[in-house]
Amino acid sequence: MRRTKCLWLLMLVLSLALVAAGCGGEEPAGKSDGQAVSGDTEKTSWELIQEKGVMTIGLDDTFRPMGFRDEKGELVGFDIDMGKEIEKRLGIKMEWIPTDWNGVTGALNAKKFDVVINGMSITKERAAAIGFSIPYVNASIGMAVLKDNTDINTKDDLKGKTVATQAGSSGCEACKSLIEEGIIKEAGLRQYNQYPEAFQDLSIGRVDVVVVDVTTAEDYIGEKPDAYKIIKKPLVEDMYAIGLRKEDKDLKEVLDKTLREMMADGTLTEISKKWFDGKDMIAMPK
């Protein structure tokens, strides 16, 4: 009986030792000294772009003169030329992806493309959803009317008028501000999917004015100088920048550095004069 009891005690001690060894032996994978050991960290957007050698870019391919199709169907414009220069300097390829401008910030955050390069204005609404590079074009939001129009000279003259703009654009945001100010009524605002549709309706008298980026308006007037004119005083001062996701800090640093270099060596000024009728519209570097 005594021997049996001793054996039982010995077995109990051995069992406890085995349990203790199982609990306190080798640490679980991924931990060391009580600290989590990270495995492969998630790659940043810039690292993935470098790895693929391709940067994808969202744009409205009807937005003259920033990015649009020529008579051959090829993409041309200020932003396209700027993109080609960025390609060379960063050693990557640009893949341009046409998208619905009204949902462009949502598509960017959904990672449908890496950045937006398309004369994108820095606005409060957009800045709440996405990040921006430094500005590269100093533009403004203005009013385009028919050449013989003498009724519209200031924003106050828009009262009772039918106003056209592109949905989701900076021109649309300017129109919303005009509604808040009581200058125009919501019923008097017509939003189009693309600016060419708005200018078409202006040409046939369906709308009285198009609220639009001055750079775009000047391009349309250059095509039809006898049809349209721009009201001299702009509605809103405006800056174009590259749109990117807020978390893409390293990509922003790369793009900001590249834009500053292109400003400093005159490359962007050359592109500006090509597309803006000899004008230097480049924003001053900061």
Image (tube, rainbow, N blue to C red):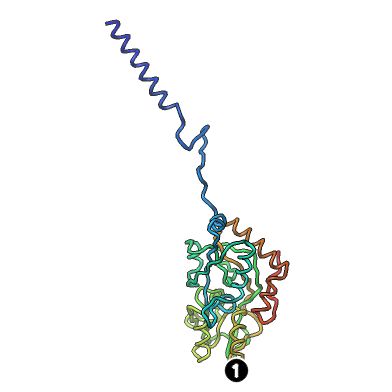
Residue extending farthest top: 2
Q: How many marks?
A: 1
Q: Foreground residue, 145 or 216?
A: 216
Residue 254 position in % (x across, y down): 63, 59
- Taking the spot 53% from the left edge, 90% from the top edge, the residue there is 203
Q: Residues within 10 Å of mark 1 (few under 14, many from 20)?
A: few
Q: Position of residue 38 (x, y in %)?
A: 51, 42
Image quarter in which the N terminus is found: top left
What residue occupies the far left of the structure in this picture?
A: 1
Of the 4 image quadrants, the one containing the C terminus is bottom right
Percent position of residue 165, x then y: 52, 80
| Vertical relation: 12 (above or below) 110 | above
Residue type for callout 1? Asp
Rendering coords of residue 270 (x, y %): 69, 75
Q: Is residue 232 left or right of residue 174?
A: right
- Kind of element beneath mark 1: loop
Q: Residue at x 54, y 88 (%)?
A: 208
The image quarter in which residue 250 lies = bottom right
Q: Which residue was labeled with disc 1?
A: 148
Looking at this view, is 85 or 218 the one in front? 85
Q: Residue at x 53, y 58 (%)?
A: 52
Most foreground residue, 214 or 155: 214
Above or below: residue 20 compared with residue 93: above
